[in-house]
Amino acid sequence: MEGFEFACPTKIICGAHALDKLPGELADRGVAHPLVMTDAGLMKLGIAAKLTDVLDAAGVAYEVFDQVPPDSSMDVVNDVARLFAARGCDGFVAIGGGSVIDTTKGAAASLACEGVDFATLQGSEILRHDLPPFIAVPTTAGTGSEVTLVAVVADTQKHAKLSFASYKLVPHVAILDPALTSSLPPKLTATTGMDALTHAIEAYTSIQKNPVSDAFAVKAIELIAANLPRACAEGGDVDARANLALASLMAGAAFSNAMVGIVHAIGHSLGGLCHIPHGQAMMMLLPHCVRFNLHHGVHAGTYGELLGHLSPKRAAELGPNATPAERDLAFCDELLALNAFYHDTYGVPLALSELGVERDLLEAVAKQARYDGAALYNETEITVENALDILNATY
């Protein structure tokens, strides 16, 4: 076996009423005046109040920043860092999706470097100082940002998404409470669930995969396959919601160590240039990117290894004598079938044209994808032409 590294330093608290443990976790870390990070939508829906009610009941004083945009941005990161210092805060609690958690990572990193502009920290392992205490409370089961070493933040001036990677960026605690995702509508449940599935599949097929990341990825795929349809059909199914939150976290831990590939390389560019929500982009691109890799002889047999975890029924139908190539193709077909199911049942878009993307933008997206950091972890090189072919297939 080749040598490898795997790190998941986050304390994980999962299950019904997990949020009740927040005051104790803050106290354990010496936090007396946290800055609660969230967005306007979660404030309006009363979801953020579920967290602040717990703090109020425990007598914890806090500040709130609720203006995180759907795409985390450099400007907001720097504003938050200034607010944290001005209000005398001593820790962060982020309640929201990937954008809220990534914005918090950025602000915390800037503070750890004594107020340095976060833009200057772009790249890998540039951080040298520990973040202030940081507790992440995800409200979607998709990004896995609560356990990842990555922050993706938009540069609104350049219309690009910038990636930052450091083990110093990983939140100290992740609280997964199914009550926080139960009101997520079916369409958003589907796209965030497929985002987590993409993380797990790309982690399992990355050139940097290892036995521990594989174990996390495989379990995440099993949990998503078994629970995503249930959570979409019955939002209040506590077990399904808890299992999806755990799957998202496990997929996040897997790709935080193994990294991702072509789906993310193109998806980041779609987000930056066309403002396509990340989970939506992942869902649309995934089958087409798997087909691309298989067509180029990449991961031959590896995708097929995942078939039984994604669809035990399809694997049983194929039987034990199926060739690796047959299993690979069946896996790709299952991804297409999953997308069709969520499209037909819940109206999730499957084509870029449905989202109003102009075709003449695709070349710029392909050029940016070619140089995205995630492209480095795909086994075959991604040319501009390759990326454009995949985008046209998704159009």
Image (cartoon, helix red, strand yellow):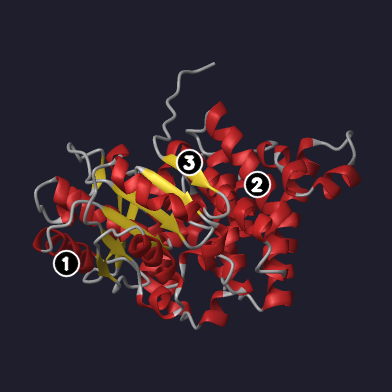
Badge number at residue 253: 3
Q: Residues within 10 Å of mark 3 (few under 14, many from 20)?
A: many
The quarter in which the N terminus is drawn is top right
Separation (CA) of disc 2 from disc 3:
13 Å
Q: Position of residue 18 (x, y in %)?
A: 50, 52
Tell me the quarter of the picture where residue 351 sits. Answer: bottom right
| Callout 2 secondary element | helix
Q: Position of residue 221 (x, y in %)?
A: 65, 46
Residue placed under numbered mark 1 in the picture: 79
Residue at (22%, 46%) from the top-left corner? 132
Tell me the quarter of the picture where residue 236 sits. Answer: bottom right
Residue at (68%, 63%) from the top-left corner? 237
Identify which amino acid the numbered label 2 is placed on.
Ile
Above or below for 63 versus 222: below
Residue placed under numbered mark 2 in the picture: 221
Identify which amino acid the numbered label 3 is placed on.
Ala
User: Which of marks 3 and 2 precedes in the sequence?
Assistant: 2
Check contact, mark 2 vs mark 3: CB within 8 A. no
| Callout 3 secondary element | helix
For residue 87, say whether it is visible.
Answer: yes
Above or below for 280 versus 375: below
